[in-house]
Amino acid sequence: MKNTGSRSFRVMLMTFDLTPLWISFKTTLVTTVIVFFLGIGAARWVMNLPQRVRGIVDALFTFPMIFPPTVLGFFLLLLLGNNSPLGQLLKGMGMNLIFSWSATVVSGTVVAFPLMYRTARGAFEQVDRSVIDVARTLGLSKRTIFMKILLPLSLPGLMAGTVLSFSRTLGEFGATLMIAGNIPGKTQTLPIAIFFAVEGGDMRTALAWVGLIMLLSLLCMVLQGLWSFRSKATVSGR
Amino acid sequence: MKLSVDIEKKLTQFTMNIRMEIDQENVSILGPSGSGKSMALKCIAGIEKPDRGRIVLNDRVLFDSERGINLPPERRRVGYLFQNYALFPHMTVSENIEIALQNAWNRKKRVRELIEKFHLLGLEEAYPVRLSGGEQQRVALARMMAAEPELILLDEPFSALDGILREQMQQKLPGLLHGNNYLMVTHDMDEAYRLSDNILVMENGKMLAFDARERLFDHPPNLAAARILGLRNVSEAIRVQENMILVPQWGCFLECGGKQKVSHVGIRSQHVRISTSPGVNSFMCEIVRILEDRFTATLFFRLLIKRTRDVLLQAIVDKERWEYMKKGGHSLFACFPPDKLLLF
């Protein structure tokens, strides 16, 4: 009895399709890197805009956060689908975005971008104005101020934003399903695999994936906690 | 250092308006909190933009609204010492100074020189949070000098220091700045007097006076400036004779020459003499309240005259003298020396 149990477990491990984990890992990593730079760049750009335009751009960048993911997915489908001008253009260049792996990155980026953008902006705005002003009177270039003063001083906030984006992308379901679909081994990410496992009555697989995702999220939180602890210690000089 | 400023900026409460010429002098802008002094400095540094006007530093136009010139702060070569020093918290003392150095050569040597000059030896690797207020200020000054500014602006430089440290820094500052001229903002008239040649008095964004410090304290040009410069005893006055004015609020006539068209008279608390014998312009008085300091006492008194309204005047007297007079139990006289009366 015991023997057959462990054997069936071994069989399950051997036959278990690990591709959703790999796809999710790739998607989340690539998306987080893209969103990290995009969010920081956007935050810096918006901060230097004239007051009147700033509100409008800020609202535009925040929209994806308040829309339901399926609605976002729908718009992305309209925007990038084969019948749209953009889709036609991509097709002409020999690329088909919809239902490809890249689509998981596109949906992840759109969904996680506002999180990174907002936290980055918050982190930048939290930096003492007079520190930035004094840097300017010292003759430092805008680039030096950004790289050597603004970025390091807002690092804890930026890291928080990165972790948020990472977790959000890892859990992304709605928009991804709309534009990337559920193609096993190609666009089937972890959350999508869980949904279809449950739908197919395969509770064991679903449970395995759920456990894994929880573990990953927990790890993220611990890393984030350690990081903010360490950076606080450096700035306060202890 | 030559600076010419003529700017205007609309703020929420009032419009700031400043016009001054500085030529090789140390200047203070003196005014109560919220009078727009710091805003004036920020406009000169380029951190804030005036609505109108012109700023010229050593023949370099920093700002000219008509010609559309507005140099960014990083190109003005104007050093600014912030009230809270605004050190870079994630950098050590050395790094704070080094980042401000202008050219790439000899950086280590320049940093070491500045560290020595500003008495920061041993603190090179410390982060700003670990430093005392005085040390932080010296780092901020060293960092400012590292950028080789043509003009130095100090925003309430001593307000974050206390007691002995404040006095020490007030003494050392001119030396630390290498004899470079500075423009300072303060709300403390003694500090302004100690540390500057010329003083600009400001209130609600308006310039009330701008003159050499002695002339300004001895002959303030108007009542508002005189009040900011520490004048406490003020009343309306009417010229009744060539050599006599009537002071209705104090209920007395005062012998006093000088200006014929008079609307107000005032006298500094330090110039009112309290004594036990009468003299010119002296009246019997009654002490109502006393504010004692270590070596002086401020006496709040009322003149014993029938027509007087309920006005309290103040006199600052030497404490030993006051103790002596108090013991005698004589009647007291307040004397307003004619040459010390300020007429407006």
Image (cartoon, coloured by chain):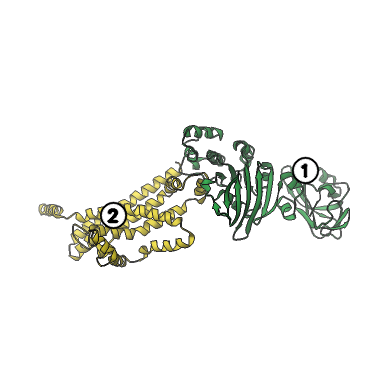
User: Can you identify the residue that label 1 sits on?
Assistant: B318
The answer to which of B271 and B139 lies nearer the viewer is: B139
- Residue identified by numbered label 2: A28
Residue B337 in sight from this viewpoint: no
Q: Colour of chain A?
A: yellow
Q: Nearer the viewer, residue A133 or A115?
A: A133
Quadrant housing the C terminus of chain B: bottom right
Say which residue appears at 66% left-offset and 47% top-offset: B21
Marks 1 and 2 close (CB-CB < 8 Å): no
Amino acid type at image mark 1: Asp
Residue B110 in view here: yes
Residue A73 sits in which quadrant? Answer: bottom left
In the rendering, at what x and y percent does residue A74 appear?
29, 67
Residue A79 lies left or right of residue B63; in this view the side is left
> Residue B123 location, x and y as percent?
50, 35
Hue used for the chain lettered B: green
Residue B101 placed where, x, y %? 50, 38
The quarter of the rendered structure image containing the N terminus of chain B is: top right
Q: What amino acid type is highlighted by mark number 2?
A: Thr
> Helix or strand or loop: what does disc 1 sit on?
strand
Is B145 on the left or on the right of B253, as rendered? left
Tell me the distance, in whole angstroms, between the alpha carbons under discs 1 and 2. Answer: 79 Å
